[in-house]
Amino acid sequence: KVLLFILRTLSVLIVLVYLFLPIFRRVSTSFEKPKGIILIDNSESMNNKVGEKSKKEISESSYNSLIKSIENSYRTSEYSFASGISGSKKSTDIVKTVKELFSNEDFTGAELFLFSDGYYVNNDFSQLSNYPVTINTFEHKNNSSLSQAKIINVRNSRTSFIDEKVPFEITIEKSLEDTLTLIALNKGRIFYKETIPISDKSVIKKMIINKFKKRGLQEITLQLKSRDEVLDSRKVVVNIEDNKGEIAFLTDSPNWDLKFIKDIVKLDKKFKQKVLVQRKGSIYINQDKVKLAEELEGVSLLVIINNGRIHLSQKERETIKKRVKQGVSLFLVGAPTRGIEELYPVTKSNVTREYETSVIPGFSINDFVTFKDYFKDYQELTPVRYNFYSLKSGAKEIATFDNLEKAPAISYSRLNEARILHFAFHDFWQWKMRTDSAKFTELITNIINWLNSKAGESFLFSTDKDGFYFGENITFRSVILDEKGDYLSGKDLHLEIKDSTGVAVIDDYLVKVQEEYLYEADFLSPGKYQAILTDIDTKQKKQLAFLVLDDNLEKQQDDFNNQALFQLAEETGGQMYSLNNIEQLKGSLKRDKLKKEEVLEYDLVRNISILILFIILFSLELFLRKRWGLL
């Protein structure tokens, strides 16, 4: 009976377990080292010497001193990197490397120990905030003989003009007590040479000024020498353009409108200007008779203020039409000039009488932010003298006159790349007297800049500079602007980059990042390139040229960039350790093992062995009861 009781009890227990504890859980506790990642920089810059040793040798010495301490406290994984884990050694990119690490394995909560010189093509360490890893770096001393005299910065204008003075501000850092020589070369020709005498100053600034006779990208090589030995060199590129924008005014009678526009244009030094006055069938500048065709050469914007007495010859009419077709924009004030009426966005009406009334916002004003902002308080604008005109098909009505007919007052149209703006009235200079003077100046400035830029130049395309070291990241940027300079979005921008032989080496699309469109390229071979950006919707194209220099970016890095290493550690919540006291550093690297608790689950319902046990126990009890006559 005791045996039968035990068998029955075990069977009932199994049934109760199935009913009330189908899944059995227990907590398993263990201790393990935290994760540690060791990253070793093996880019070409690590071969540069700091004193008697290369940076690689100095970094390896630090690594050998610390590796046992790190391995005793961490479960380590070790990687070499440059431009990524398996990328080119000609540049170093820590951001790309961390991204690659996390794409291959989950290193959440890991500490990363970085043995590197701190020079990276991407110093935007904020991108690492998306990756839960702490980066620890190591501070090294810089005692390079090369660092005894070094060009640490060069400031210059990216763009200048033929025969214009181009300044280069050069900052030199030195600890060398010797005479230095600063040399500047353009296409192998020395155009500047100066001896820098011995001084107590550790930082010296020098200004070089040069004029360039040819347009295009000009490569400048700066050399710092001591006793005929080149201690440091730096290359910069400046883009030389033909000339500044030039604005021509054509009128039959200089008036206050002309004077106010001229005075505002004078505030912007990038513009030249000239005033052409027609008198008795001839064109004059001051008292000198000139030819219109010659004076419009090089002009980017033509302002015509017609008081009704401009009479152009057939040749002069054709000259203006030709220049507009070539992209010269027009700012037209007053009556359409006879012989070039087709260039105006309006046509004359049969009403010849002159009226006076206010100007109010028109149907298309929301498309023109400059006018939309200015006309917010249009009730304050002084009435103006005007004639009736009719808007042409395809032209836009920015403002109208405050009359029953709502005749066009300010209208706009385009002809190829040329913008054409028409004020169908005079005396708008009085708006400056009645409204905020600064707002009027801003209105005219925006109009001049907008018209002077051609229709395609609200589509901007640029790089950070015009010359890049081999291996350096090249960022292409583009923005689409309205006439006031505000950003537009929703564009498909196609980028094609061709080498000097015309072969396309990149064919891709820019990516929208906030207000900008961006594309990054790297490892283009040394040489000259042409980048062509196309707006797929409007078919507008922009082009720029840039150089990839023979010099490798890595070769310029002859010390440890401790500032970048500190910033990297701070940005990721890590520490920058000093290598002055190795033993103390080893102690600070000790970490306690992490307590790991793991919940283990056992699914008893699906455990076939328990079910078999139940069947055996239950069957055995039945068999024994039957055998003993107790069933």
Image: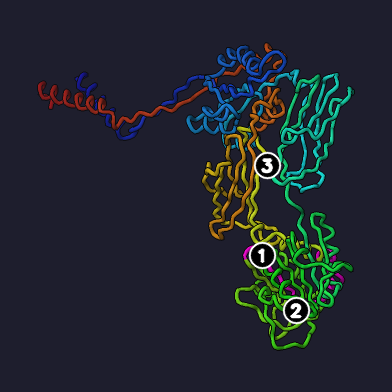
Q: Is residue 452 left or right of residue 606?
A: right
Given residues 217 and 111, the one toward you in this image is 217
Q: CA distance from mark 1 to mark 3?
A: 28 Å
Label 3 SS: loop
Is the residue marked by circle 3 packed among few (<14), some (14-19), or many (20+) residues within 10 Å?
many
Identify which amino acid the numbered label 1 is placed on. Answer: Ala
Identify which amino acid the numbered label 2 is placed on. Answer: Ala
* Pointer 1 residue: 418
Label 2 SS: loop
Do the residues under discs 1 and 2 have CB atoms within 8 angstroms? Answer: no
Residue 141 in picture, x, y percent from top left: 73, 18
Residue at 69% across / 62% down in the picture? 483
Please tell me in which quadrant of the rendered image residue 188 appears. Answer: top right
| Position above or below: 293 against 402 | above
| Position above or below: 73 against 317 | above
Can residue 82 be spotted in the picture? yes
* Pointer 3 residue: 466
Residue 335: assigned label: 2
Please tell me in which quadrant of the rendered image residue 369 appears. Answer: bottom right
